[in-house]
Amino acid sequence: MEPGPLIFEPILKRRIWGGRRLETLGKQLPPEEPIGESWELADLEEDQSRVRVGPARGETLAALIEQWGEGLLGGVGLFEGRFPLLIKFLDAARTLSVQVHPDEGMARRLGGKVRVKNEAWYIIDAAEDGAIFCGLKEGVDRRAFEAAIAAGRVADTLRRVPVRAGDCHYLPSGTLHALGAGVLVAEVQTPSDITYRVYDWDRLDPATGRPRELHVEQALECIHFGEEPQRQQRSHAASVWTSVTRLVTCESFLIERVRLCEGFEQELPYRGMVVWLVLEGQGELAGQSGEPLSFGPGDTVLLPAALESARVRILRDTSWLEVTVPVPGGLAGRQGPDRAGLRRQPPGMVQINPPPPGERA
């Protein structure tokens, strides 16, 4: 079976902070349940994505890694034996718990399912007063934070960042954070589902009538006190038909926002594995055989490294997040040219200077 474009069944997660806005991304939600997460690409012990559209329908992502190998991944390596990305959409009808993810030191000490979790949030939509909590206020060290926990004043120590649609924030492991109420995001992260809650806004779980479990001791060991998340500098390229904006560059993944105009058509320009998180519009991928694969808002499309002779056609103005995984230096030649050469830019495409320091990230 030749590798082809794939769309997987979403794995829906009930969360006490969830809502119903994932329906705006085409997700069919169970009635009257607060659904907080739609897992789009997952290769974890308890959760496996299954192909909904494309070759090998019904197969799990783990099975495709076994069957296609480099045909799927190219030169990209596995992350501790797993597909190197976990892709989600999140709907925060209520504010999430204040939490932190394990860093390398904690992951090594605990082992097992505990893996480093670097992640990024792209804001799809936000209420007028939408915000995230990202890091601690200046001067809050471990001693001050422990005192705030004891006094029930954790909220007073958090750095609140207003957000709007189109913002993107990178949250490396060790960063204390929480997604605020009224914010809908696409989340790109390493394949880990380990979260240590340090504060949950004094709320009760409706299912039990009790507070949810906290992990204060583990969280304190993971938080990188005195380190603020670094703003990611954007860069842009644009032509009459297309624009590309680099949003996140880190050791775990690269994220770019791609915009294409209605009527654009081009052979796929990649020589490596790519993931699209479609934000708006409509298009199709056509190959030498079989029916074209249609995609629209809320679809997450996995393009295998060995995909050949496929063309993308844009039926309505479209934008997506394009996610790739850095290839180790010694394997880069097996995937083709470096990232700058993966997209054959149409004639007239020009680089635009990065935004000034004051522009929103």
Image (tube, rainbow, N blue to C red):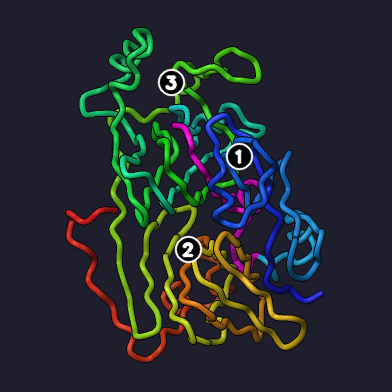
- Mark number displayed over residue 201: 3
In screen coordinates, is 205 left or right of 157?
Answer: right
**In this orientation, does residue 137 appear?**
yes
Q: Amino acid at mark 3?
A: Trp
Q: Earlier in the sequence, mark 3 or mark 1?
A: 1
How far apart are labels 2 and 3 at the CA level? 32 Å
Note whether 355 is above or below 348 in the view shown.
Answer: above
Number of disc labels: 3
Q: Are marks 3 and 1 in contact (CB under 8 Å)?
A: no
Residue at which label 1 appears: 35
Residue closest to the eye, 120 or 335:
120
Q: Secondary structure at mark 2?
A: strand
Residue closest to the eye, 203 or 232:
203
- Mark number displayed over residue 321: 2
Question: Residue 301 lies in what quarter of the image?
Answer: bottom right
Tell me the residue at 22%/71% (across/down). Answer: 353
Which-is-in-front pick, marks 2 and 3?
Answer: 3
Which span of residues is magenta-colored? 73-95
Query: Is 334 covered by the magenta stretch?
Result: no
